[in-house]
């Protein structure tokens, strides 16, 4: 079984690596990501590319499919 895991990172001295933000049984939609606090433009980017830092953002998300 595979699930989609949403994590985030923050470019900050006190960060502790990736932070868990949610899990989905199927690839999430923009609406599902919005319910986790992800903006619409960022959600579309996540769905297409899987996420990551786009420019010099201080925080960013990753969306990965993993074995459960």
Image (cartoon, helix red, strand yellow):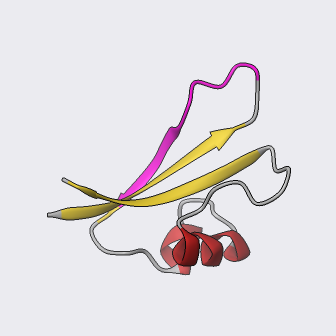
Left or right, 55 with respect to 60, comes to right
On the image, the x and y values in percent for residue 52 come to 63, 56
Q: Tell me how many marks there are.
A: 0
Of all residues, the one furthest to the top in this rendering is 14
Magenta-span inclusion, residue 22: yes
Q: Name the residue: 58% across, 69% down.
A: 46
Q: Name the residue: 27% across, 62% down.
A: 3
* 20, 31: nearer the viewer: 20
Kindly indicate the quadrant of the structure image that contains residue 54. Answer: bottom right
Magenta-span inclusion, residue 47: no
The part of the chain drawn in magenta is 13-23
On the image, the x and y values in percent for residue 61 come to 60, 54
Left or right, 56 with respect to 46, comes to right
Indicate the quadrant containing the N terminus: top left, top right, bottom left or bottom right: bottom left
On the image, the x and y values in percent for residue 63 come to 48, 61
**36 w.r.t. 49: above or below:** above
**42 w.r.t. 20: above or below:** below
Q: Name the residue: 82% across, 50% down.
A: 57
Q: Name the residue: 68% across, 76% down.
A: 40
On the image, the x and y values in percent for residue 60 come to 68, 51
Kindly indicate the quadrant of the structure image that contains residue 51. Answer: bottom right
Of all residues, the one furthest to the right in this rendering is 56
């Amino acid at each position: 079984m595979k699930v989609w895991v949403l994590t985030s990172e923050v470019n900050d001295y006190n960060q502790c690596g990736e932070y868990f933000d949610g899990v989905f049984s199927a690839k999430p939609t923009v609406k599902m990501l919005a319910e986790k606090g992800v903006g619409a433009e960022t959600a579309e980017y996540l769905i297409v590319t899987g996420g990551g830092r786009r420019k010099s953002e201080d925080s960013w998300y990753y969306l990965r499919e993993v074995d459960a």
